[in-house]
Image (cartoon, coloured by chain):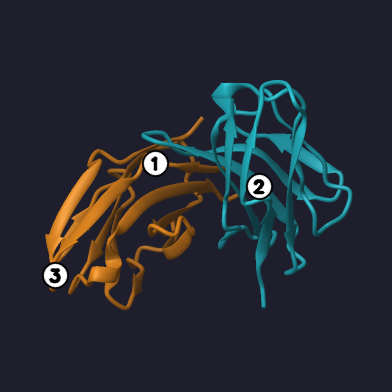
Chain colours: A orange, B cyan
Amino acid sequence: AQTVTQSQPEMSVQEAETVTLSCTYDTSESDYYLFWYKQPPSRQMILVIRQEAYKQQNATENRFSVNFQKAAKSFSLKISDSQLGDAAMYFCAYRYANTGNQFYFGTGTSLTVIP
Amino acid sequence: EAQVTQNPRYLITVTGKKLTVTCSQNMNHEYMSWYRQDPGLGLRQIYYSMNVEVTDKGDVPEGYKVSRKEKRNFPLILESPSPNQTSLYFCASSTWTGNTQYFGPGTRLTVL
């Protein structure tokens, strides 16, 4: 089975500052997808950003960007200009491109935004 | 509105009493999944389905059953719930590419 590791159970950031959440994964496959999901206190799971492994360019979505290092099997999330609404649990997830529907999630990082 | 719905949202039950958590999506998605979320463990996939009558085990299938008789519905069945199945459960759906999963609002289950 694939494994996804988030080594930072908790992180904090000052409002308007930048924070980076770490994620590493273990796989022998070359074609896969990586995701970051946000879970606010409402418990709703919200897709933040997605990266296809075959793409060398790092994905960006407004204030959110990733640093995808395929050889190192690393997939970190950078949040710029942090806002109070960014406070949430963040999960990294992996999906092999050809298995259809098997997803593997990390254990999550709880992000606190300090006003 | 495109959405995944789950019912009930909250359920308290007793050991051994069979229960079903329903999941329905209105996006005509082929893929559907069930997850459980536990503190410190993240989300773990219980079962997934790639289409009607096609289901497969995820990482933690013991004690659960599913069925996919219609494309839009994917119920989770606990035949004999036990306290270690107390958890937050999510249903999710996606197209066959699986690139974007849409999650339901979650079901908080407590087994006494």
Q: What residue is shown with label 3? A: A15
Toward the viewer: A29 or A38? A38
Q: Neighbour class for label 3 at 10 Å: few (<14), some, many (≥20)?
A: some
**Rendered position, B82 above or below A46:** above
- Disc 1 secondary structure class: loop
**Rendered position, A107 above or below B95:** above
Dot 1 amino acid type: Gly
- Disc 2 secondary structure class: strand
Q: What residue is shown with label 1? A: A106
Q: What residue is shown with label 2? A: B33
User: Which residue is drawn at the image coordinates 14% and 66% (left, top)?
Assistant: A18
**Rendered position, B6 above or below B109:** below
Q: CA distance from mark 1 to mark 2?
A: 17 Å
Q: CA distance from mark 2 to mark 3?
A: 36 Å
Q: Neighbour class for label 1 at 10 Å: few (<14), some, many (≥20)?
A: many
Dot 2 amino acid type: Ser
Tell if the residue under mark 2 belongs to the same chain as the one under mark 3. no
The C terminus of chain B is located in which quarter? top right
Of callouts 3 and 1, the N-terminal one: 3
Residue B110: percent from the left, percent from the top?
57, 34
Q: Label for residue A73? A: none
Residue A100 visible in the shown view: no
Name the chain under label 3: A
Residue A8: percent from the left, percent from the top?
22, 42
Residue B21 position by quadrant: top right
Tell if the residue under mark 3 belongs to the same chain as the one under mark 1. yes
Residue A2: percent from the left, percent from the top?
47, 34
Toward the viewer: A35 or B24? B24
Name the chain under label 2: B
